[in-house]
Amino acid sequence: MTSALDTLTPTQRDLLDQWLPGAELVSDRSELHRAGTTALVLASGEDRFLVKTTTEGVRHIDRELAAFRSWLAPWSEAGRAPSLVEADRNARIIVMTHLDGEPATTSAAVHDPEIYRQAGELLATFHGQASVEDEDYEAELNERAAGWLDDAGLDAELTERLREDLDGWEAPVTVLRPSHGDWQPSSWVLDGGTLRVVDTGRFGFRPALYDLGRLSSHDFTRNDAFEKAFLDGYGSDPREPEAWHRLRVRDALSVARWAHRTGHAEVSALSAETLVGLLEK
């Protein structure tokens, strides 16, 4: 019978045998992660570990290693994120401690505002570790967004309205902070009412407001109490209106372009509707 361990390369298997000799497969969590990522829970004695590997060209291992090596200590030391055990960047394999808990996406507790207060508090701690000023960040993103306009499948009127909007955008010096990059319930597990973070594969330096994007589009729209609790935990609202508008337009335009190029008509229509709404605010 084929085991999920058989999907690893010979080099990855050799490293795993050195690091966790005799470890046994407990479960395959790969379906919870992005394409090209294998995620396996292994048992070695009484301890459990999460092993991640990626295929060639998938950069999430690089980003996760960068997060572990320099920025996850405030969470890991408090038991709110895994700790790094072993890694080999060239072999595209990383071993971390396994955190108990139920995926937040399937837990009834994700409907409790307290979870969002914890999410805000944890994110504020992460963002507060460093800040870097970048003179080119916004200008480069604005230029990229302008290049997407003619490849997003939008009607001529909407395209022209967007072009006029983009032409009026500023490109101020931007403060970048350590950013999780995918801050939403799919990156959390819940254990006895405690929120823990399980995936930092999109780590990078970005404006603080970036990490509120997915929550604002989904979870905050379900219940106003979630947004209030999150901001109470975070301590402020980093969504400066003009920067927030630029981020939301760029995100919606990026999705529209992807949907047009891949033939997802329903997503394309929803993206166009979102863009119209953003221009009317």
Image (spheres, grey):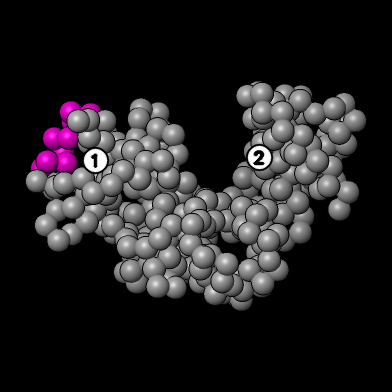
What is the three-letter code of the residue carrying label 2?
Leu
Q: Secondary structure at mark 1?
A: strand
Q: How many marks?
A: 2
Question: Mark 1 or mark 2, which is nearer the start of the sequence?
Answer: 1
Q: Which residue is painted at 69% across and 48% down in the image?
A: 247
Q: Which residue is painted at 31% across and 43% down in the image?
A: 28
Q: Quadrant of residue 84?
A: bottom left
- Can residue 61 be seen here? The reply is no
- Residue 217 lies left or right of residue 15; in this view the side is right
Q: Is residue 12 magenta?
A: yes
Q: Quadrant of residue 162?
A: top right
Q: Secondary structure at mark 2?
A: helix
Which residue is identified by label 1? 88
Answer few, some or many: residues within 10 Å of disc 2's Cα (few below 14, many 20 plus, some between 14 and 19): some
Which residue is identified by label 2? 141
Q: Quadrant of the N terminus?
A: top left
- Residue 8 lies left or right of residue 222; in this view the side is left
Return the x and y of residue 278 as percentages of the image width and height.
81, 48
- Can residue 242 be seen here? The reply is yes
Return the x and y of residue 252 as percentages of the image width and height.
71, 41
Q: Which residues are magenta?
A: 9-18
Q: CA distance from mark 2 to mark 1?
A: 32 Å
Magenta region, main secondary structure: helix
Return the x and y of residue 266 as percentages of the image width and height.
72, 33
* Residue found at the far front of this picture: 1
Picture layout, residue 191 above or below residue 28: below
Picture layout, residue 1 above or below residue 129: above
Q: Is residue 72 magenta?
A: no
| Mark 2 or 1: the one toward you | 1
